[in-house]
Each structure stands twice: as C-alpha cells, then as structure tokens.
Amino acid sequence: AQSVTQLGSHVSVSEGALVLLRCNYSSSVPPYLFWYVQYPNQGLQLLLKYTTGATLVKGINGFEAEFKKSETSFHLTKPSAHMSDAAEYFCAVSAYSSASKIIFGSGTRLSIRP
Amino acid sequence: GAVVSQHPSWVICKSGTSVKIECRSLDFQATTMFWYRQFPKQSLMLMATSNEGSKATYEQGVEKDKFLINHASLTLSTLTVTSAHPEDSSFYICSAYSPQASTDTQYFGPGTRLTVL
C-alpha cells in the first residue's frame, strides 16, 4: 500500500524567500515520486519526478526536490519565490512505473506575499 | 510534449440526466487512462483505471454502474455519469499513459467541471 502526507495545507512566504513544501511517503515497494502544480480551475502540471538514480531532482520553474529514503521524504524547494508560484501543489506516489495508479497527497496551497 | 484534452471543459446538467466526458490523447496512443475526481479544495481521488479494449478497474467505493468508463480506442476514453445528482458535482480529471510518449509519465487533461442542478 502507498500513501502520501503533505505537512501544512497552507504555506505563505514572501516574494524572494525560500519555498519549502514538505512531503512524506509510505510505500512497500520502490516508489516513483512526483510533484504537481495546479492553478485555479486547471488541470495538473508535472513539476518534477523521481524514479531511480540521482536523488536530487530538478524540475521546471526553478523547483527541485530531494528523495531521502531514510526519512521517507520528498520535499519540494525553490530558492526564491515568485508571485507566479502561487498555486496548489500536490505530492504524489506510484509504484514501479508511471503506468501505475498515482496516489495524491492532500495538497498544499502556496501563497506569496509581495 | 504529449497533450491530453478533455471535452467539455464545463458542463451544467439537471438532476437525473446523464453526462459524457471525453478524454483524448492528441499526439500519442494511450495504453492506459485514469479517471480522477476532485472536490473543491481537496485532493484528486482515483476513480478507475482503464486499459484499451478491456473493462475498467474501479477503486473501492466507486459505483461502476453510475460512472461508466469506456476506452474503445488508444486515443479516447469516456466517462459517463449516469443519472447525475448534485453530489456528483465535481472536477473530473483524466490522465493518459503510454510508454512510447516523449517521457515515461502520465499526462493529465485540463479537467471537466460538472455542476448538477
């Protein structure tokens, strides 16, 4: 069985500040891990994903995440927040491959203060 | 990159009617498609998985007779909400997967907002 826990349903940071969105996962098999972003009334856009290999994954829009097996974590970071980063972010996990069903976390709403 | 479309993007219907939502992979053949629903300010919940040419696999708690899924071709899957009621109002999102697509990942459609009056 797999599950994802996102810590903090709402995170607010100042423009230019570090963004840190926390995600912990549980998986009985080697996981595929994802971060998606969703803007209001839109679908999902893949920010980045981890499958195997390098544990630091770089994604679009300056985001990156690090897979830490010992901590079962996959936190999302961005060094400097931009107003356009305000959105809902979902951490997700699947098993074995991208063809498997994806289990989503509850989501974290990121707000950016001017 | 791979593109998935959904039609319609927004639909309003009366209680008791049926609504069909289409999910199309525009530039790749999707061996597997997934249907999710998302209630306001909540996460996505997987409803069912469909493979082309076979019956869909529904998640626990999802009524297969109410949410009819057809995956008749490698580029099209449909979700029909039968006898819709206000509690079925939600945002429905599909995703499509093909190992031959540009990257080994699922591609999500833009979603369909269903409002049942």
Image (cartoon, coloured by chain):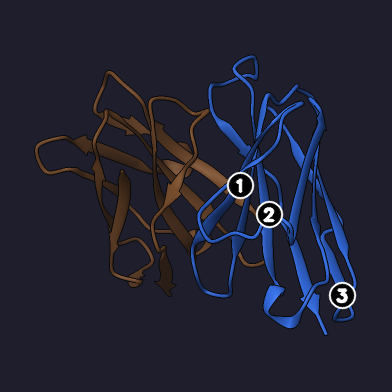
A83 up-or-down from A27: above or below: below
Ranked by sequence position, the earlier of labels 1 and 3 is 3
Q: Chain of mark 1?
A: B
Q: Residue furthest toward the left?
A: A70
Local secondary structure at mark 3: strand
Q: Is residue B103 left or right of residue B33?
A: left
Amino acid of disc 1 = Ala
Q: Which residue is mark 3?
A: B12
Ranked by sequence position, the earlier of labels 2 and 1 is 1
Residue in the foreground of this view, choosing between A110 and A113: A110
- Disc marking residue B64: 2
Local secondary structure at mark 2: loop
Q: Which residue is mark 1?
A: B48
Q: Quadrant of residue B27?
A: top right
Residue in the foreground of this view, choosing between B36 and B110: B36
Q: Quadrant of residue B115?
A: bottom right
Question: Can you tell which of label 3 and label 2 is closer to the viewer?
Answer: 2
Q: Is residue B89 left or right of residue B16?
A: left
Q: Chain of mark 2?
A: B
Q: Colour of chain A?
A: brown
Q: Crowdedness of circle 2 by 10 Å Cα count: few (<14), some, many (20+)? A: some
Q: Which chain can be seen in blue?
A: B
Mark 1 → mark 3, Cα distance in angstroms: 23 Å
Are the residues under badges 3 and 2 in a single subunit?
yes
